Structure formats: structure tokens, C-alpha cells
Image: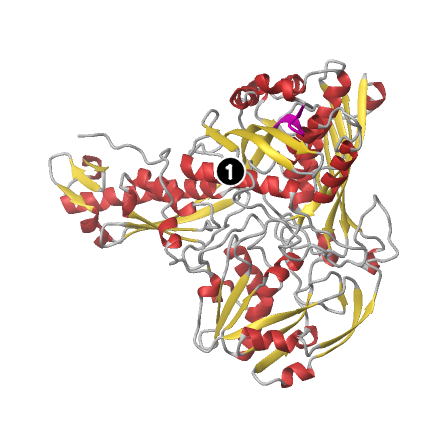
Amino acid sequence: MNERVPLVGQPIERVEDPKLLRGLGSFVDDVHRDGMLHAAILRSSVAHGVIRRIDVAAARAMAGVHAVYTAEDIGAVPRIPVRLFPNEAMEPFRQPVIADGKVRFVGEPMAIVIADTPALAEDALELIEADIDLLPAVTRFEDEVVHDALLFEAHGSNRVFDYEVSRGEIDDTFETAPYTRRERLYVHRHTGITMETRGVVSEWDAAAGRMTSWGATKVPFANRKILAGMLDLPEEQVVMIEGNAGGSFGVRGEFFPEDFLVPFAARKIGRPVKWIEDRREHLLAVTHSRDVAADVEIACNRDGRILAIRARMQMNIGAYFRTSTTIAPRNVGQFLPGAYRVPRYRADVAVIASNKSPAGTYRGPGRFESDFFRERMFDLAADDLGIDRVEFRRRNLLTPEELPLAFPAIAPNPVVTELDSGAYEQVLDLCLAKAGWADKQHLQGKLVDGRYHGLAVGCFVEGGAAGPRESARMVLETDGTISLYVGSSAVGQGVETILMQIAADAMDLPLEAIRVFHGSTTYVKEGWGSYHSRSTVMGGNAVLLAAAEIKAQLLTAGAGLLQCAEQEVSYQAGRVAARHGGSVGLKELAAKGIAFEATFHNTKHTYTYGSHVAHVAVDAETGHIEIVDYVAIEDAGRIINPLTLHGQAIGSIVQGLGGTLLEHFVYDDEGQMLSGSLADYLVPLATDYPNIRSSSIEMCPSPNHPLGAKGAGEGGTIPVGGILANAVAAALRDFDVQPKALPLSPDRIWRLVQTAAARPA
């Protein structure tokens, strides 16, 4: 008999794709309910002001309009809770689901119109008159500045929260160190632009007292809990249905004001209501990210070995705390040391409110920023000390013997996390070899056919597998197949394929014998969704636990049918066989009601790691930066599916390149967004970055769980900003225009290369 080849580790094409490629997917805008009405949101056109009056009489009187609701109609306006690492001190700064007495950013909801059609609802918005006393807008932040224009007057400052991060005692290290350098660095504001904008369809069943909402992504169970509390309903009376999703990237799927306003309207009117966001709304009001400034100081010995790093950081979180706002300021402070040996470290992170859209998570939150700060400082220090940039990193990379190693401590809301495993220097060497680093060094700063060439390298770590738990339920169906219900959500990462592979191997069955149902709150008792690169590790281990119990039940049921003791039967390839002869298959055993829901508990994160090399050519005449070559290698522990992981890595790198070179939310001094369309906010095209080479390897499995895999959906983005900044600096190294304020927004690139062009070669 041929031995079965395990499916885990095989490059299996995504089972999700054929349906989507044939146009048979079901996205939120594909949901239609009998008697459905449509919603439109009136959004503030000013960034900061006191609401004196909102006159909705004319809109309510318009034919085809069923209702118009403002804060006055809602009564006690709910505020969106902080889902991750909440703290009592954040309470005054949580976002109301609708503007209540004051508006604090352009795009903040002020009213919701319900009408027969989307067009009628939008027409009715034009009839609403809002009387707002304007206040000065705050769009920039300075360290510890108390602005005349306070978003929250009672607080007395626009600095609304602080984090302190530390490892060891810095004492007089910077006064006695042989070498120190300090720089002011900045990462501009941008976010994940999903193909599918946000949307909600809600239906109220008065007889059952049940609210059903379609369009849930990322964290349906968490959003169910939030909505149930706001509607004063038991959690089990709120159902979140997850369909297909046109991307998430950490941006979509958190709880937004519309996630309350649409169900509220459906309940009040007694008819289903649909709202679909347009692209301008998305750019104005979706969660933004990045927007961090830092004063970073590094202390080294003359041989380049790091003695200490300290930083004072300011993160502009926009107008309010939302569900995931805490993550980026925590990460930017805690993860700056990365994969390197930094014995003494301190970071103070000031969280600053401003009249911009609220901030939250976006692929590699806080890590993209901290990697830029660190890798830029490393190149500057290496240059000052006359040390090769690769050698500087090699001397400071952690060795396998130093792992596991705890990250610096953070307060408040401390959490202990540690690098689990890794061979950082070995992967760096593999990446350099693949990129042909040694052979290309003669190109550094070289003018070739009118363009200046530069190369840079950097190392990163990516956190994954956030706990505390995840659920999976297996059911043996009458046709002998296994239905697998999981709490993990599908946000485009291929979770169905991955969990099918794990389940098929665990049950010793072919892939087609497994069917996966994900995310919706009707499938399992509790689910935690998809964020922090957690689905494979947390969901996959829950599947292993469920499969182990299902096989135990099969052995018990099989022994009964075969009339022998349990120790006399074995399970293989979907059959229970007795030692004395005879066997039964899954179809016969299904009548025994074989089912189980398992929960995997975990508090230890995984850390994928790797290195990237970029080769760029800078045209000083036009400001164009070409990615001549981009090479990435990452160790993801145990790889479940090399094909889907490769797609994740390439896509993640492209998002990092887009955020570095193209994407930029620009506000004027009045808080008006100047990049509020895709004509002004540039996203990468498929043809922009054709020269990306990425490899994922299995070198150091995570020791923290049975599967051994590491979360690996964000690592491609994390190091891009720092590496691109250093590559451009290397290209222009003979000019006094070193890019300290990068990642490179388009206006910064233009000033940079214009200065370079004005200087003689």
C-alpha cells in the first residue's frame, strides 16, 4: 500500500479561488432581503466644531425617505469600546457612534438617512442643514504641546495617553558611550485600501428578538458582543454573518459607527437596511495608521556593538480611541529592538489626539514604523563608525543560544512576550547571497544611464498567534465527509485551504472530504477571529484538538459496531478496523452523532523573522524611484502551504512599497483631507513592482505549540520603509540630502531628488 503523502507542506492552490474567479462569491453588497431599505451617512464637512443644530425636517419630508436619525433621536449615544488593551484612562476619548455635541474630524457621522434607494438617501443628505460653530483644527503634533484648540477640553491637553517601555537601566550610558547619534524621524499617515469598501446589512426579527447583520469580517464575535451591549440584547440574540471579504489588512472588520447605526435603524423601522460605503467615505473615515514621529538616540562601542537605544515618540491617533487604537503605539515602543541585541532600551510614547480620522491597526502596526526608525539609525551609525552596514547588523543580531528572549517591558497594561526561535544571521546570509549583494556593491551611489543606484539590507521580526484562545468544531456528516466550523475569519488569506490541509492530515482523509465554514457567530460557541497573523496557529491547533477527539469517538463507536474492545480497533484513512478482521467506514459511523468543539488556549506568540534587500535606481530629473530588484527571505517555522504563504509575502511587500513610495493622507491646516480620492491617494498597480523575489523557508519551528507554524502574513510589509529609505540614501550618498524624514512620501521624494539634481556629480 502506498503511504499517504501529507497535505501539510504541499503548495495546494486555494480552494476559495474558483468560486471567486467565476463571480460566484457572496460579498456584503450581494446580500438582498425582502423589503430592504438603504442608508446614507451625513458626515461632518468640518474638522472641529460645536454642533448647535442639525435640521433634518426637509430630509424627513422627502418622498421615499423613511427616517432620519441624529444623536438626539438615539438618546444616550453609545461609545465604541477599546477592544485590545483597554485602560480606564482612555474612557473619555472613545468615539461616539454619532457626533454628540461636537465634531472632531472631517467624515465623522452626524446623521443617518434611511430611504427606498441609495440615490434617494444620498439626495436627502443635501437637504439636511447643520449649524456648527467652528473651532481651530489640530492636524500636527509637537511633543507635549498643549494646544489652544483642545479636542477634549476637560482633559486640558491633546496628549491623551502615554506608554513607557524599558529594558535594563540606561543610567549614564549615553554620557559615557564612545559613540552616540540622535535623529528626528517620521513616518507619514496612510492605511490599507481594501478592494471592497465596508458595508452592513441588518435585519431585525421582532418576534424572535433577534438582530442579524451581514458583512462581518475579522472579529465577528467581538463585534457581536459590542453590538449586543449597545442594543441591550443578550449576545446569543445577535448574529453576525461573514461572507467573502475583499481584503482587511487589519483595517476593515473592527467596530465602526455604522456597525451600530445600521442595526439601530433596522430595529427602529422594522425593515432590513443596507449601507455600502463609497470610496471617498472609506478614505475619510476608515481607520488610518502610521503617522509617528520619533527622536531616536543610539549608543555604541567603536566596533559598532550597541550599548543602548532610547527614543521619545509621538503617535497621532486622530480624533478618538477605537477598538484597536492601542496596538500601534504599544508596538512602536516595544518592538524597536527587533531581532537585535539591545541590552539597555527605553522608549516613551506619547499618544496625541488630532482632528483626523481615528487610527488603528494596519498590516504590521507599529512594527513598520519601529523598523524604519531602527534600520535608518543603523545605517547612519555604521557610516559614522566606518563599519560595513552588513557587519554592523551581524555584530548585533541575536544568536539562537540567546533565545527565547523577552521583549522590553511595557506599561501600562503590561504583556509578556518573547522571541521564540530563530537563526537570524543565517537567514541574513541567505538573503544577501540570493540578492547578489557582494557583486553589486560597486553600484552604490553610481550614476548609470542617468539614474543613481543604491542597495540596502534590513532584518525584521513579525509577531503572530495572539491568544488567548480559538475554537473549531468538527461534525461527521451522513455522507462520510467532515464539516469543520472555525472561529477564525476569512479576510483573503486563504484560511479555508490552510485549515482544510491541517484537518485532512489530522483525520487521514483526502482534501475533498473536508468542508470549512468560517467566522459567522452561528458556527461555534466562541471565536476570536483573524488578526495578528493568528489564524493558522490558533485555528490550526484548535483543528488538531478537535480531530483528536473525533478520532477517539470514532474508535469508541467503531468498537461498538464491530463488537470488540476499544483497544482492539484502530483508525486509518476514514475507517475503523478490528484486529480480528472487519471494518466500518465513516458513513456507517455517522449515525452515532460524531461531533466535537475544541478550544486551543495559548498565551505565547510566534515570531517569523527574515531579511530583505532592495536595489533601487533614482532618477534625479523626474523623482522616479525604480525597484530594480527586491529580495526577501523569511523563516515561518513550519509552512502549511508554500503557495499561499508566497502570495501573502509578495502582497505584503507590495503594500509596504505602496505605503513607502505612493500612499499618503495629506491634511491642510483646517483639517480638510487633500488626498480624498484614488486620483490623489495613490495605490500600487500590478505593474509597478514586477521585480520582487520572495522565499519562505522552514528553519526554526515555533516551540510554543504542536503545529510549529508561525504567523506570517505581515512580515513582508514591516521592513520595507527602512530598507527603501536606506537604499535611496545609498544612491544619493554623494549629496547632502540624506533622507532622514522617510519613508518617502511623493512630495519628499521630489524635494530630495531636486536637491540632488541641482548639485554637480
Query: Image point 62% across, 63% down: which residue?
Result: 257
Q: Give 738 or 704, whichever is nearer the viewer.
A: 738
Q: Main secondary structure of the magenta part?
A: strand
**Residue most toward the top?**
303
Instruction: Let me know if residue 55 appears in the view.
Output: yes
Q: Quadrant of residue 543?
A: top left
The C terminus - image quarter: top right
Measured as percent of width and height from the top left, residue 759 is found at 80, 29
**Residue most toward the front?**
449
Q: In the image, what residue type sits under mark 1?
A: Ile
**Residue 451 colored magenta?**
yes
Query: Image point 23% across, 39% down: which residue?
Result: 573
**Residue 125 colored magenta?**
no
Reading the image, the residue beneath label 1 is: 650
Measured as percent of width and height from the top left, residue 80 is found at 64, 60
Q: Give 413 or 402, whichever is nearer the viewer.
A: 402
Measured as percent of width and height from the top left, residue 561 is found at 16, 47
Q: Give 221 or 685, whichever is nearer the viewer.
A: 685
With 515 as the anchor, is 175 left or right in this view? right
Report the span colored magenta.
447-459
Q: Is residue 616 above or below residue 687?
A: above
Instruction: Let me know if residue 239 appears in the view.
Output: no
